[in-house]
Amino acid sequence: MLRQALRRQPGVSAAEASLVSRAVFSYFRWFGWLEKGRPLEEQIIQALELADAFARQPDRFLDTELMALAVPDWVAKEMKVSPAWVRSLQLESRLWLRARQGQGIALAKELGHCELFGAGQSKDTLRYLGTEDLFRTPAFQAGRFEIQDLSSQAVGLICNPRAGEIWWDACSGEGGKTLHLSDLMENKGLVWASDRAPWRLQKLKRRAARAGIFNYRTAFWNGRAQLSTKTKFDGVLVDAPCSGIGTWQRNPHARWTTTPQDVHELSQLQKRLVSNAAASVKPGGKLYYAVCTLARVETDDVVTSFEKENPEFGRLEIQNPFEKQKTSSSQLRLWPQDYHGNGMFVAGWVKE
Protein backbone atom coordinates (compact mmCIF):
# COMPACT_ATOMS: atom_id res chain seq x y z
CA MET A 1 0.00 0.00 0.00
CA LEU A 2 2.91 2.34 0.75
CA ARG A 3 4.42 1.63 -2.67
CA GLN A 4 1.10 2.32 -4.38
CA ALA A 5 0.60 5.57 -2.46
CA LEU A 6 4.06 6.82 -3.41
CA ARG A 7 3.49 5.98 -7.07
CA ARG A 8 0.36 8.12 -7.07
CA GLN A 9 2.30 11.16 -5.86
CA PRO A 10 3.76 13.13 -8.81
CA GLY A 11 7.31 14.37 -8.59
CA VAL A 12 8.45 12.24 -5.64
CA SER A 13 12.13 11.38 -6.05
CA ALA A 14 13.64 8.05 -5.04
CA ALA A 15 15.39 9.73 -2.11
CA GLU A 16 12.13 11.32 -0.91
CA ALA A 17 10.27 8.01 -1.27
CA SER A 18 12.97 6.34 0.83
CA LEU A 19 12.54 8.96 3.56
CA VAL A 20 8.77 8.50 3.60
CA SER A 21 9.17 4.73 3.74
CA ARG A 22 11.58 4.94 6.66
CA ALA A 23 9.24 7.28 8.52
CA VAL A 24 6.27 4.93 8.11
CA PHE A 25 8.16 1.85 9.26
CA SER A 26 9.77 3.73 12.16
CA TYR A 27 6.31 4.83 13.30
CA PHE A 28 5.14 1.21 13.62
CA ARG A 29 8.47 -0.05 14.98
CA TRP A 30 8.41 2.47 17.84
CA PHE A 31 4.62 2.59 18.20
CA GLY A 32 4.71 1.46 21.84
CA TRP A 33 6.73 4.53 22.85
CA LEU A 34 4.62 7.17 21.09
CA GLU A 35 2.36 9.67 22.83
CA LYS A 36 -0.92 8.89 21.10
CA GLY A 37 -2.55 12.18 22.06
CA ARG A 38 -0.04 14.23 20.08
CA PRO A 39 -0.57 15.13 16.39
CA LEU A 40 0.44 12.34 14.00
CA GLU A 41 3.28 14.39 12.49
CA GLU A 42 4.82 14.85 15.94
CA GLN A 43 4.50 11.12 16.64
CA ILE A 44 6.33 10.32 13.39
CA ILE A 45 9.13 12.73 14.28
CA GLN A 46 9.35 11.14 17.74
CA ALA A 47 9.58 7.67 16.15
CA LEU A 48 12.42 8.76 13.83
CA GLU A 49 14.29 10.25 16.79
CA LEU A 50 13.92 6.99 18.71
CA ALA A 51 15.14 5.00 15.69
CA ASP A 52 18.22 7.21 15.36
CA ALA A 53 18.94 7.00 19.10
CA PHE A 54 18.67 3.21 19.07
CA ALA A 55 20.98 2.96 16.05
CA ARG A 56 23.61 5.13 17.79
CA GLN A 57 23.31 3.90 21.37
CA PRO A 58 21.20 0.75 21.73
CA ASP A 59 22.35 0.29 25.34
CA ARG A 60 20.43 3.43 26.29
CA PHE A 61 17.28 1.31 25.99
CA LEU A 62 16.79 -1.11 28.87
CA ASP A 63 15.75 -4.71 28.22
CA THR A 64 12.72 -4.29 30.47
CA GLU A 65 11.60 -1.24 28.51
CA LEU A 66 12.00 -2.96 25.16
CA MET A 67 10.20 -6.13 26.22
CA ALA A 68 7.31 -4.08 27.62
CA LEU A 69 6.84 -1.71 24.68
CA ALA A 70 8.16 -3.34 21.48
CA VAL A 71 5.59 -6.17 21.24
CA PRO A 72 2.05 -6.77 22.56
CA ASP A 73 1.68 -8.45 25.97
CA TRP A 74 0.02 -11.58 24.58
CA VAL A 75 3.11 -12.67 22.65
CA ALA A 76 4.89 -13.98 25.78
CA LYS A 77 2.11 -16.55 26.22
CA GLU A 78 2.67 -17.92 22.71
CA MET A 79 6.46 -18.10 22.39
CA LYS A 80 9.79 -17.46 24.06
CA VAL A 81 10.34 -13.69 24.29
CA SER A 82 13.97 -12.82 24.97
CA PRO A 83 15.74 -9.46 25.19
CA ALA A 84 17.91 -10.44 22.21
CA TRP A 85 14.88 -11.17 20.03
CA VAL A 86 13.09 -7.95 20.98
CA ARG A 87 16.23 -5.88 20.35
CA SER A 88 16.54 -7.42 16.89
CA LEU A 89 12.99 -6.28 16.08
CA GLN A 90 13.95 -2.64 16.67
CA LEU A 91 16.70 -2.71 14.04
CA GLU A 92 15.97 -1.70 10.48
CA SER A 93 15.77 -4.79 8.28
CA ARG A 94 18.50 -5.85 5.88
CA LEU A 95 18.02 -6.32 2.15
CA TRP A 96 19.00 -9.82 0.99
CA LEU A 97 19.49 -11.02 -2.58
CA ARG A 98 19.67 -14.53 -4.00
CA ALA A 99 21.88 -14.77 -7.06
CA ARG A 100 21.44 -17.59 -9.56
CA GLN A 101 23.62 -20.59 -8.82
CA GLY A 102 27.31 -19.80 -9.08
CA GLN A 103 26.76 -16.11 -9.92
CA GLY A 104 27.06 -14.56 -6.46
CA ILE A 105 30.58 -13.13 -6.78
CA ALA A 106 30.00 -11.78 -10.30
CA LEU A 107 26.69 -10.20 -9.28
CA ALA A 108 28.26 -8.52 -6.24
CA LYS A 109 30.91 -6.92 -8.47
CA GLU A 110 28.33 -5.79 -11.01
CA LEU A 111 25.86 -4.24 -8.56
CA GLY A 112 28.41 -2.89 -6.10
CA HIS A 113 27.56 -2.11 -2.47
CA CYS A 114 27.16 -5.84 -1.80
CA GLU A 115 28.44 -8.18 0.90
CA LEU A 116 28.59 -11.93 0.26
CA PHE A 117 26.99 -13.82 3.14
CA GLY A 118 29.22 -16.80 2.35
CA ALA A 119 28.30 -19.02 5.32
CA GLY A 120 27.61 -22.73 5.05
CA GLN A 121 25.75 -23.63 1.85
CA SER A 122 24.65 -20.06 1.05
CA LYS A 123 27.33 -19.24 -1.53
CA ASP A 124 25.09 -17.03 -3.64
CA THR A 125 23.43 -14.97 -0.90
CA LEU A 126 24.23 -11.24 -0.87
CA ARG A 127 23.37 -8.35 1.40
CA TYR A 128 22.72 -5.17 -0.56
CA LEU A 129 23.85 -1.91 1.08
CA GLY A 130 23.28 0.52 -1.79
CA THR A 131 20.38 2.82 -2.64
CA GLU A 132 19.72 1.96 -6.29
CA ASP A 133 16.28 0.71 -7.33
CA LEU A 134 17.24 -2.91 -7.90
CA PHE A 135 14.10 -3.68 -9.91
CA ARG A 136 15.39 -1.37 -12.64
CA THR A 137 18.87 -2.91 -12.91
CA PRO A 138 19.82 -4.91 -16.04
CA ALA A 139 20.82 -7.85 -13.82
CA PHE A 140 17.34 -8.05 -12.30
CA GLN A 141 15.62 -7.64 -15.66
CA ALA A 142 17.77 -10.50 -16.98
CA GLY A 143 16.64 -12.76 -14.12
CA ARG A 144 20.08 -13.07 -12.53
CA PHE A 145 18.87 -12.51 -8.97
CA GLU A 146 15.80 -12.33 -6.76
CA ILE A 147 15.14 -10.19 -3.72
CA GLN A 148 14.56 -12.88 -1.12
CA ASP A 149 14.95 -12.88 2.65
CA LEU A 150 17.86 -14.83 4.08
CA SER A 151 15.66 -17.25 6.04
CA SER A 152 13.45 -17.85 3.03
CA GLN A 153 16.57 -18.86 1.10
CA ALA A 154 17.42 -21.28 3.91
CA VAL A 155 14.23 -23.25 3.23
CA GLY A 156 15.23 -24.00 -0.36
CA LEU A 157 18.74 -25.00 0.72
CA ILE A 158 17.33 -27.35 3.36
CA CYS A 159 15.00 -28.99 0.80
CA ASN A 160 18.07 -29.51 -1.43
CA PRO A 161 16.16 -30.86 -4.47
CA ARG A 162 18.11 -32.76 -7.10
CA ALA A 163 18.07 -32.31 -10.85
CA GLY A 164 15.48 -34.60 -12.41
CA GLU A 165 13.32 -34.96 -9.28
CA ILE A 166 9.63 -34.03 -9.04
CA TRP A 167 8.66 -31.59 -6.26
CA TRP A 168 5.53 -29.84 -5.07
CA ASP A 169 5.61 -26.34 -3.58
CA ALA A 170 2.17 -26.63 -2.05
CA CYS A 171 1.67 -23.04 -0.85
CA SER A 172 3.81 -21.28 -3.40
CA GLY A 173 2.33 -17.79 -3.21
CA GLU A 174 4.13 -15.58 -5.74
CA GLY A 175 6.81 -18.21 -6.24
CA GLY A 176 9.93 -17.14 -4.35
CA LYS A 177 10.69 -20.65 -3.12
CA THR A 178 9.44 -22.25 -6.35
CA LEU A 179 12.07 -20.30 -8.31
CA HIS A 180 14.74 -21.28 -5.80
CA LEU A 181 13.83 -24.97 -6.00
CA SER A 182 13.89 -24.81 -9.80
CA ASP A 183 17.27 -23.10 -9.81
CA LEU A 184 18.72 -25.70 -7.44
CA MET A 185 17.39 -28.40 -9.80
CA GLU A 186 19.23 -26.72 -12.70
CA ASN A 187 15.93 -26.34 -14.56
CA LYS A 188 15.67 -30.14 -14.80
CA GLY A 189 12.88 -32.30 -13.45
CA LEU A 190 9.61 -30.64 -12.46
CA VAL A 191 8.19 -28.41 -9.71
CA TRP A 192 4.45 -28.16 -9.23
CA ALA A 193 3.50 -24.79 -7.72
CA SER A 194 0.05 -24.38 -6.22
CA ASP A 195 -1.87 -21.71 -4.35
CA ARG A 196 -5.47 -20.82 -3.56
CA ALA A 197 -5.13 -17.34 -5.16
CA PRO A 198 -4.90 -17.40 -8.98
CA TRP A 199 -3.43 -13.86 -9.08
CA ARG A 200 -0.40 -15.08 -7.11
CA LEU A 201 0.17 -17.87 -9.62
CA GLN A 202 -0.02 -15.34 -12.47
CA LYS A 203 2.68 -13.28 -10.78
CA LEU A 204 4.76 -16.45 -10.37
CA LYS A 205 4.53 -17.03 -14.13
CA ARG A 206 5.81 -13.52 -14.86
CA ARG A 207 8.68 -13.95 -12.40
CA ALA A 208 9.58 -17.35 -13.86
CA ALA A 209 9.61 -15.95 -17.40
CA ARG A 210 12.00 -13.19 -16.37
CA ALA A 211 14.24 -15.68 -14.55
CA GLY A 212 14.28 -18.16 -17.45
CA ILE A 213 12.73 -20.88 -15.29
CA PHE A 214 10.58 -23.35 -17.21
CA ASN A 215 10.61 -26.68 -15.29
CA TYR A 216 7.41 -25.92 -13.38
CA ARG A 217 3.64 -26.15 -13.61
CA THR A 218 1.01 -24.20 -11.71
CA ALA A 219 -2.25 -25.50 -10.25
CA PHE A 220 -5.00 -24.26 -7.95
CA TRP A 221 -5.00 -25.89 -4.50
CA ASN A 222 -7.16 -24.78 -1.60
CA GLY A 223 -5.75 -27.23 0.94
CA ARG A 224 -8.67 -29.62 0.74
CA ALA A 225 -9.23 -30.79 -2.83
CA GLN A 226 -6.73 -33.08 -4.48
CA LEU A 227 -4.02 -31.48 -6.58
CA SER A 228 -4.79 -31.91 -10.29
CA THR A 229 -2.23 -34.69 -10.73
CA LYS A 230 -1.88 -38.25 -9.49
CA THR A 231 1.90 -37.82 -9.33
CA LYS A 232 3.68 -38.96 -6.19
CA PHE A 233 6.47 -36.53 -5.35
CA ASP A 234 10.11 -36.93 -4.40
CA GLY A 235 9.63 -33.91 -2.17
CA VAL A 236 6.82 -31.70 -0.92
CA LEU A 237 7.27 -28.28 0.67
CA VAL A 238 4.39 -26.86 2.72
CA ASP A 239 5.38 -23.24 3.33
CA ALA A 240 2.13 -22.64 5.13
CA PRO A 241 0.21 -19.40 5.78
CA CYS A 242 1.09 -18.23 9.28
CA SER A 243 0.87 -15.33 11.71
CA GLY A 244 4.18 -13.95 10.41
CA ILE A 245 5.61 -13.24 13.87
CA GLY A 246 9.03 -14.05 12.44
CA THR A 247 8.72 -11.10 10.03
CA TRP A 248 8.02 -8.45 12.68
CA GLN A 249 11.34 -6.74 12.13
CA ARG A 250 10.61 -6.29 8.42
CA ASN A 251 6.85 -5.79 8.89
CA PRO A 252 6.53 -3.88 12.21
CA HIS A 253 2.91 -2.88 11.54
CA ALA A 254 1.89 -6.55 11.89
CA ARG A 255 2.76 -6.47 15.60
CA TRP A 256 -0.29 -4.31 16.23
CA THR A 257 -2.77 -6.07 13.93
CA THR A 258 -2.02 -9.75 14.65
CA THR A 259 -4.10 -11.27 17.47
CA PRO A 260 -3.84 -14.47 19.57
CA GLN A 261 -6.99 -15.65 17.80
CA ASP A 262 -5.18 -15.36 14.45
CA VAL A 263 -2.33 -17.49 15.75
CA HIS A 264 -4.58 -20.30 16.98
CA GLU A 265 -6.85 -20.29 13.92
CA LEU A 266 -3.82 -20.50 11.63
CA SER A 267 -2.48 -23.43 13.64
CA GLN A 268 -5.59 -25.43 12.74
CA LEU A 269 -5.18 -24.51 9.07
CA GLN A 270 -1.50 -25.52 9.13
CA LYS A 271 -2.29 -28.93 10.60
CA ARG A 272 -4.82 -29.57 7.84
CA LEU A 273 -2.52 -28.40 5.04
CA VAL A 274 0.50 -30.47 6.02
CA SER A 275 -1.59 -33.62 6.60
CA ASN A 276 -3.41 -33.29 3.25
CA ALA A 277 -0.20 -32.61 1.34
CA ALA A 278 1.51 -35.62 2.92
CA ALA A 279 -0.70 -37.99 0.90
CA SER A 280 1.21 -36.98 -2.25
CA VAL A 281 4.66 -37.97 -0.96
CA LYS A 282 5.98 -41.17 -2.54
CA PRO A 283 7.62 -43.88 -0.39
CA GLY A 284 11.10 -42.67 0.45
CA GLY A 285 10.09 -39.10 -0.41
CA LYS A 286 10.53 -36.06 1.81
CA LEU A 287 8.06 -33.66 3.36
CA TYR A 288 9.04 -30.25 4.74
CA TYR A 289 6.92 -27.88 6.81
CA ALA A 290 8.05 -24.25 7.01
CA VAL A 291 6.54 -21.13 8.60
CA CYS A 292 7.91 -17.65 9.25
CA THR A 293 6.62 -17.66 12.81
CA LEU A 294 7.98 -18.88 16.14
CA ALA A 295 4.72 -19.34 18.07
CA ARG A 296 4.48 -22.75 19.74
CA VAL A 297 1.02 -23.60 18.40
CA GLU A 298 2.25 -22.96 14.83
CA THR A 299 5.47 -24.94 15.23
CA ASP A 300 5.73 -27.59 17.97
CA ASP A 301 1.99 -28.26 18.11
CA VAL A 302 1.72 -28.73 14.35
CA VAL A 303 4.64 -31.18 14.37
CA THR A 304 3.19 -33.17 17.30
CA SER A 305 -0.23 -33.36 15.67
CA PHE A 306 1.18 -34.46 12.31
CA GLU A 307 3.36 -37.19 13.77
CA LYS A 308 0.49 -38.55 15.84
CA GLU A 309 -1.76 -38.84 12.78
CA ASN A 310 0.90 -39.97 10.28
CA PRO A 311 3.09 -42.67 11.86
CA GLU A 312 4.40 -43.72 8.43
CA PHE A 313 6.53 -40.54 8.39
CA GLY A 314 9.84 -40.62 10.24
CA ARG A 315 11.73 -37.53 11.32
CA LEU A 316 14.29 -36.15 8.91
CA GLU A 317 17.55 -34.69 10.15
CA ILE A 318 17.86 -31.04 9.13
CA GLN A 319 21.22 -29.33 8.69
CA ASN A 320 21.40 -25.59 9.35
CA PRO A 321 22.54 -24.26 5.95
CA PHE A 322 24.18 -21.23 7.56
CA GLU A 323 26.58 -23.20 9.77
CA LYS A 324 29.77 -24.83 8.52
CA GLN A 325 29.79 -27.26 11.43
CA LYS A 326 27.50 -30.18 10.62
CA THR A 327 25.10 -30.38 13.54
CA SER A 328 21.55 -31.34 12.70
CA SER A 329 18.20 -32.05 14.32
CA SER A 330 14.66 -32.82 13.19
CA GLN A 331 13.61 -29.17 13.62
CA LEU A 332 15.31 -25.86 12.93
CA ARG A 333 14.52 -22.42 14.31
CA LEU A 334 16.21 -19.42 12.75
CA TRP A 335 16.08 -16.34 14.98
CA PRO A 336 16.42 -12.78 13.61
CA GLN A 337 19.09 -11.91 16.19
CA ASP A 338 21.33 -14.74 14.95
CA TYR A 339 21.27 -14.23 11.18
CA HIS A 340 19.55 -10.87 10.58
CA GLY A 341 16.79 -12.39 8.50
CA ASN A 342 13.19 -13.33 9.31
CA GLY A 343 12.40 -15.77 12.08
CA MET A 344 11.75 -19.18 10.50
CA PHE A 345 10.79 -22.69 11.64
CA VAL A 346 11.40 -25.79 9.51
CA ALA A 347 10.59 -29.45 10.23
CA GLY A 348 11.10 -32.43 7.94
CA TRP A 349 10.02 -36.03 7.55
CA VAL A 350 10.69 -38.96 5.23
CA LYS A 351 7.93 -41.38 4.24
CA GLU A 352 8.88 -44.90 5.28
Image: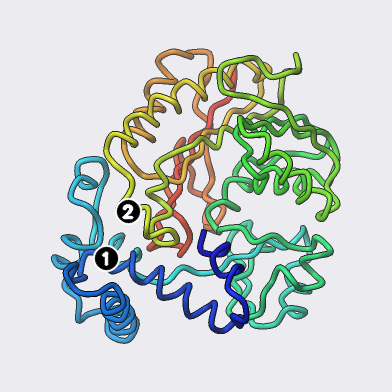
Q: Residues within 10 Å of mark 2 (few under 14, many from 20)?
A: many
Q: Secondary structure at mark 2?
A: helix
Total numbered badges shown on the rendered structure:
2
Between marks 2 and 1, how big is the CA–CA gap? Answer: 10 Å
Picture disc at residue 120: none
Viewer-closest of 128 and 308? 128
Q: Is residue 121 left or right of residue 17?
A: right
Residue named by callout 1? 31
- Apparent side of residue 118 relative to residue 183 in the rendered image (left or right): left
Q: Position of residue 273 (x, y in %)?
A: 51, 24
Where is residue 25 shown, x and y percent of the image? 40, 68
Query: Which of marks 1 and 2 precedes in the sequence?
Result: 1
344 left or right, relative to 39: right
The residue tagged with tag 1: helix, strand or loop?
Answer: helix
Where in the figure is residue 100, as x and y percent of width and height?
Answer: 76, 59
Which of the 4 image quadrants contains residue 280?
Answer: top right
Q: Are marks 2 and 1 in contact (CB under 8 Å)?
A: yes
Query: Which residue type carries mark 2?
Result: Arg
The label on residue 255 is 2
